[in-house]
Amino acid sequence: MINQEKKDILNKYADYKADIKRLEETADELKVQVLEIMQEASVEEISLPSGKLTLASRRAWTYGPVIVEKEKELKVLKKKEEQVGTASYTENFFPVYKENK
């Protein structure tokens, strides 16, 4: 049985998750504009009262056909170990919240 205090905690968690989702969507929409502003101003860092924005980059690697083939082979080998039980795993539990539509 879940008492009212525990229900309140569950509802608070769900509310926070919904708020985070909305805030992330808004931030993603602004991200393009922020990038344009920083690039137009030719700045890599902007100080704000609440912190600083830094222009960062990340490399995305593309590998040759030999490496791609080896990755596929490794994936097959991993799956086989999972199926026969020679691979080990850990299981972590976490709550998942989905907003009603």
Image (cartoon, rainbow, N blue to C red):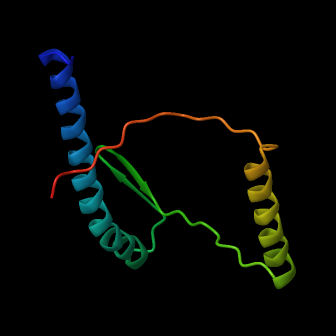
Query: 75 or 60: nearer the eye?
Result: 75
Residue at left 22%, top 29%? 10
Residue at left 85%, top 72%? 70
Pinpoint residue 47: horizontal percent, then vertical percent. Answer: 37, 52
Q: Quadrant of residue 7?
A: top left
Name the residue furthest left: 4
Q: Is residue 97 left or right of residue 67?
A: left
Name the residue furthest bottom: 65
Residue at left 32%, top 64%? 28
Q: Is residue 78 left or right of residue 17?
A: right
Q: Is residue 85 left or right of residue 59?
A: right
Indicate the quadrant containing the C terminus: top left, top right, bottom left or bottom right: bottom left
**How many numbered tags mark residues here?**
0
Q: Is residue 7 left or right of residue 50?
A: left
Q: Quadrant of residue 9?
A: top left
Name the residue furthest front: 84
Indicate the quadrant containing the N terminus: top left, top right, bottom left or bottom right: top left
Query: 48 or 24: nearer the eye?
Result: 24
Pinpoint residue 14: horizontal percent, then vertical percent. Answer: 22, 38
Residue at left 43%, top 35%? 94
- In the image, residue 64 sits, relative to residue 9, either above or below, namely below
- In the image, residue 66 sits, relative to residue 58, either above or below, namely below
- In the image, residue 30 sits, relative to residue 63, either above or below, namely above
- In the image, residue 66 sits, relative to residue 22, either above or below, namely below
Pinpoint residue 98: horizontal percent, then vertical percent. Answer: 27, 50
Query: 84 or 60: nearer the eye?
Result: 84
Query: 56 or 66: nearer the eye?
Result: 66
